[in-house]
Image (cartoon, helix red, strand yellow):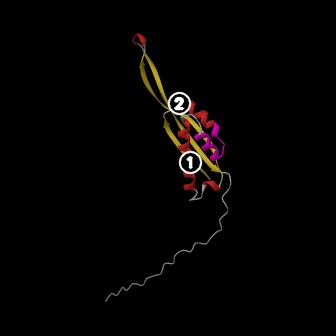
Amino acid sequence: MEAVAKLKNCPMSARKMRLLVDNIRGKSVNDALNICRFSNREAGEWIEKLLISAISNWEYKSEGRSAEDFDLYIKTALVDEAGMLKRIRPAPHGRAHRVRKRSNHVTLIVENKLPFEAEEDEEIEEPVMEEVETNNDDN
């Protein structure tokens, strides 16, 4: 089972974010969290929060099973460019230089390596509806 977490409009260039995302792609979740925590880049904080969100999404989808028991890993990690804010900075001799403030979208997909155990098929007892007699006396 896999779970997805997305970060949209992160105010950082996609190139800077890809440097960290390329390091964690395909690694186990614990290794990826350690890489993010001890990275000296700003992207580490963003990716760490996103990875924790993906783990909790997986736990919610798997109906309360613990992520530690199933050896989660990062199946897919994508960084795409988002919109760009264009600003103008004054330059000498009355000119203006364009400043591009870039942003990006990040998508993380985590999946478990260990399969779920086959649960025993338990028969679910359906509640029995009793018929209630009504007295329709038409006198």
Left or right, 56 with respect to 87, comes to: right
Q: Quarter-wise, where is residue 24 in the image?
A: top right
The crowd level at tag 1 (other Cα within 10 Å; few <14, some 14-19, many 20+) is many
Measured in 3D between alpha carbons, the distance from the residue under mark 2 to the one under mark 1, in whole angstroms, is 22 Å
Q: Amino acid at mark 2?
A: Ser
**Would residue 30 be counted in the magenta stretch?**
yes
Q: Earlier in the sequence, mark 2 or mark 1?
A: 2
Tag 2 residue: 13
Q: Secondary structure at mark 1?
A: helix
The disc label shown at residue 78, or none:
none
- Image position of 97 with respect to 124: above or below: above
* Percent coordinates x, y for residue 122 in the rendering: 62, 71
Q: Secondary structure at mark 2?
A: loop
- Residue visible at 56% across and 74% down in the picture: 125
The crowd level at tag 2 (other Cα within 10 Å; few <14, some 14-19, many 20+) is many
Write the start and end of the magenta stretch as one range. 23-37
> As drawn, which residue projects farthest toward the bottom?
139
Tag 1 residue: 54
**Would residue 107 be counted in the magenta stretch?**
no
